[in-house]
Each structure stands twice: as structure tokens, then as C-alpha cells.
Amino acid sequence: MLFNETMCCSLRFDQSPNSSLDVCSKHANDTMLHICSLHKSCIFLPSSNCSENKPCISGKLRLSLAQAITVRGISVQVRGIAKLPYDEGIFFQSYHEENTFVTTQPLASSHQQNPFTLPPGDYEFPFSIPLDSNLLETITSLGSSYRSYQVLATIKRKWNRNVIVSKPIRIYKRFSIADSLNWLSALNAIDKQWDNVAQYSVSIPDVNIPFGATFPVKLRLAPLSKRIKLQALTIDVLEQHELRIKAPASYSAQFNVHFLSSKQEHVIFSERHNLDDCTALESEDSDLEWCITKAISLPQDLEECTQDVSSNTIKITHHVAFTVELLGVGEGLSMIKGTIPFNIYMSPHVISEHGTVRGLHIDRFHDDYVPPPPLYSKHQNDRLLPMAEALLDSDTLRLDCEQPPENAFFYSPTLDCAPSYETVIQN
């Protein structure tokens, strides 16, 4: 496809023929550079370095020229950037910025590294840039871009400035249970008694929650005093950022400070629920327990929330903060407050390869109901294995603790009822 009017250079990373242009760079002499979607704009690194499928960034570079141009080379580069803020007094904030990853793949050049001429026409350059499985993850949240990655396409010109356009990409690590044992050992519930007034329990389904999910929080409250009224329940999700970087040499020499830090806290979810209809009965024998379940919807925008991070430089944590408002305890309004820490992780089941987030609903708790053991009067309904029943035969009934029966553990698809206590004694 040739253009007869102005000189136009169109450079694109195409996903499909219908991809829309989203970044445009206009160069002198009406040279225009356009960049579209990559094959994947969101990449999840494998959890193991021994993975057969090595991660890579791939795409096609398309260049359309209305007239010949002289270039020194065409290349594609993947660059990782860390931009960490730190406090410099009350009114000022500075940033420490550095490259964390750079790899370049040349697409067109001469053997002698001399400038060469590209005739008018259409050009297509497929590329595939391998990635290191140990790359740092993308971390962006609420206007902060602590770690980011970009794909840059560059046309090096002979007489004019280089033409460069970029496209952001996201790189995440797959959630691994082995790497999150500290979270698995954390409690997903708080069960306490408050000031001899009420016994309460607040719980969430799990301490590991995927990004963008909607999950329930359950409140159980049993008042220990009469005339207590449950006024309201407020639920907040807090995201806390702590950054610590080494101070630049000039700053350290001037102020005798070796490390610079920054702390921030964001509320990424907040709801208040009025519970005016929850009032304790006046009877002293009442066995009242309030049970309320409300939903927490995490943000599904990758710029409004991020995953949990724990490193020497960046630490990001999340907490569910709750406030229970009670009336009837002394004078005025009484409040029960607490927090439950949990882990937000990135998952390819939630975040697609093009960066869109699918909504995921976690509807129930793992331990919603555990049936109690049967009463003693109903013990004949217990299940026994056939061999165990044979050991209770009236002719051979005996107690032998020193020599347990052989093959006591086996599988049987049919389980009979245990004989009643009265039957064994009578025989």
C-alpha cells in the first residue's frame, strides 16, 4: 500500500487486522509512527525456572512508507523502569528512577553498520524477545508506578532525530502456595469477647484473594447484655505502601541520611451498612446471635489497586478493617474495631493476556457448616467397617490392646451400622 501525498511511516504491533491504533508519534516531514497491541500485553512468568515454555514478548512490526527514507537501523527494546518516591521535607517529594531490565532485538541494519535506504512500500518484521523468569513484577497503584515495563520501537535516522514510540506491558508472577506459606498460616478470622458486652467473630473465606475478586465478610455477634442494639457495620479495605531506598550520595553527604523512606495508605473499598433492625430481646434466657454477611468488591482497575509485595525496597499489604457500632452500652455510641490481614495476588484466571480483568465471585466459606457428632442415644447410627463389626461378635468379644487386628485399614464400599450397646451386653 503506497501513499501519494505526504510521507507516512506506520509502525504497528498487531494483534489482529482490526486492532485500533492507540499510540501515535509524529515526526518531522509528516513521518508518523503508530503502535498497536502486542500479541500479549500482560505476561505471567512461570513459577518454575525449569518450565518448558519460556516467557517471551512477541509481535509483528509493520512499516509503511510513502517514499524512500534513509535509516541507520530498526530495533525493538523491552525496558523495565523503577520509579520510587521518597519524602524530602513536608512540601516536596522526589523520585529515584533507574532501569531494572533492558534487552534489545535489532530488526533491520546493514552489515557494515552504515546508513541504508528503505524504498517505498510495506514492511513486516516479526520479533520474539525472551524474558528472564526472575524479572520483577509490575507494581502500579493509584497514580504510582513503582515498577513498569515498556516495549519501544525505534527507527534510527541519519539526518533527523530517532523516531521512538512505546507501548506499556505488564509482567506478573504466578501465585505459588510454596512461596506463600506465611499467608497460609495466617488466620482469616477474629474471634474475641469485647468488654464483657458481646462475643463477636469477623471472618473472610481465605487469606489469599485474587485481584479484582468479590468475596464475603461475615460478622457473628452474641450480646452478653440486655437492650443492646446493633447500629451499623463499616467495612474498609486498606492498602498500605512502605518504600525504603538507599539515599543518593550527594543527599547522604549533605543531610547525613543513608536511607530514604515513604509511607502511604489508600482506602480501596469502603461501605457502611445500617443495621437498625438488630435489637437484643429483654429476656434473660434469650440466646440471640446476629449473623450478617456483606460483600467486598475489590477494584478491577489495574491502576487503582495492586498485589501484595514484600521485598527490601517495597512492601505493600492489605487489611480488611471493620467497625461495629453498638447502642445501649452505657451512654452514647460504642464501637468494636479490628483488622484482618489478607493477601491480594495476580492470577491469569482473572487477568487476561490483554490486560482485561474478569470479575470473580467467592460466594461461600469453606467451613460454613460442620455437623455435630451424634448424641449418645443415637450412637447405633454410627458407621463401622465390616471387619470391626466382626470383632464385636458375642462369641469372640474381647479387649486386646497389645495386638491390634491385622489389616485394620482397608477400603470397603459398603459400611454397615454399628451394633447397639444393649445388644452386645445382653449376648
Image (cartoon, rainbow, N blue to C red):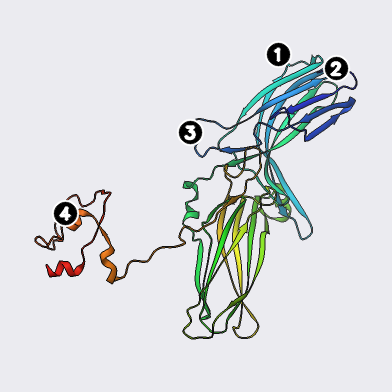
**Disc 3 residue type?**
Cys
Q: Are marks 2 and 3 in contact (CB under 8 Å)?
A: no
Local packing at callout 4 (Cα closer than 10 Å; few below 14, some 14-19, many 20+) is few
Earlier along the polypeptide chain: callout 2 or callout 4? 2
**Image x and y of residue 215, in percent:** 57, 57
How far apart are the alpha carbons under marks 3 and 1?
Answer: 36 Å
Describe the element under mark 1 as helix, strand or loop: loop
Q: Foreground: 164 or 416?
A: 416
Residue corresponding to mark 1:
111
Question: Alpha-carbon distance for marks 4 and 1?
Answer: 83 Å
Across and down, in percent, residue 297 comes to: 63, 56
Question: What residue sits right under mark 4 in the picture?
Answer: 405
Q: Which numbered marker is on residue 50?
A: 3
What residue would you read off at disc 2? 67
For disc 2, the neighbor class at 10 Å (few under 14, some 14 to 19, many from 20) is: some
- Which of the two discs, 2 and 4, sits closer to the camera? 4
What separation in Å lies between label 1 and label 2 (alpha carbons)?
A: 23 Å
Q: Nearer the viewer, mark 4 or mark 1?
A: 4
